[in-house]
Amino acid sequence: MPLSDRDRALLAFEAEWRRHDGSKEEAIRADLGMPPARYYQLLGRLIDTADALEHDPMLVRRLRRLREAREAARAARVTRTASR
């Protein structure tokens, strides 16, 4: 299924949000008109699609790597806490 306008807007925002003044959460609300939690839910699903990867491979691969690093760090914290 091809990317929707919203999907393309999410990817474009993620690629360019650093150019905004203020916090990312404020920019999400102002530019996309949605709560940050919803934005991250949609983005998380979107980067798992082949269409998103085809649309912007560098961005999608970077976001996947960041997500994997966060998951690994979270798992390491849980393991350390459980072993105490």
Image (cartoon, helix red, strand yellow):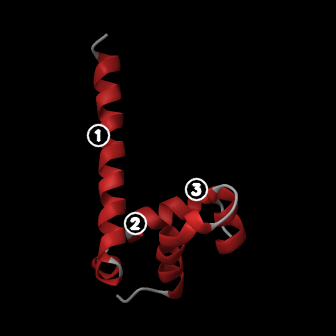
Q: Which type of secondary structure does the marked residue at label 3 adopt?
A: helix
Q: Earlier in the sequence, mark 2 or mark 1?
A: 2
Q: Which type of secondary structure does the marked residue at label 1 adopt?
A: helix
Report which quarter residue 24 is drawn in.
Answer: bottom right
Residue 39 percent location from the top left of the image: 55, 64
Instruction: Please tell me whether mark 2 or mark 1 is closer to you in this view.
Output: 1
Q: Which residue sits at x=57%, y=61%?
A: 38
Q: Which residue sits at x=51%, y=74%?
A: 10
Residue 4 percent location from the top left of the image: 47, 86
Count of numbered labels shown in the rendering: 3
Residue 81 percent location from the top left of the image: 35, 18
Is there any visible trace of residue 58 in the rendered image?
yes
Q: Earlier in the sequence, mark 1 or mark 3?
A: 3
Mark 3 closeness class: few <14, some 14–19, many ≥20 residues within 10 Å: few
Mark 1 closeness class: few <14, some 14–19, many ≥20 residues within 10 Å: few
Question: The residue under label 1 is which amino acid type?
Answer: Ala
Is there any visible trace of residue 48 in the rendered image?
no
Mark 2 closeness class: few <14, some 14–19, many ≥20 residues within 10 Å: few
In space, the residues marked 2 and 1 are separated at their CA atoms by 19 Å
Give the number of the disc on residue 72: 1
- Quick one: quadrant of the C terminus? top left
Relative side of 37 to 60, left or right: right
Residue 5 percent location from the top left of the image: 52, 87
Where does label 3 land, which residue?
A: 37
Relative side of 15 to 17, left or right: left
Q: Is residue 22 above or below residue 11?
A: above
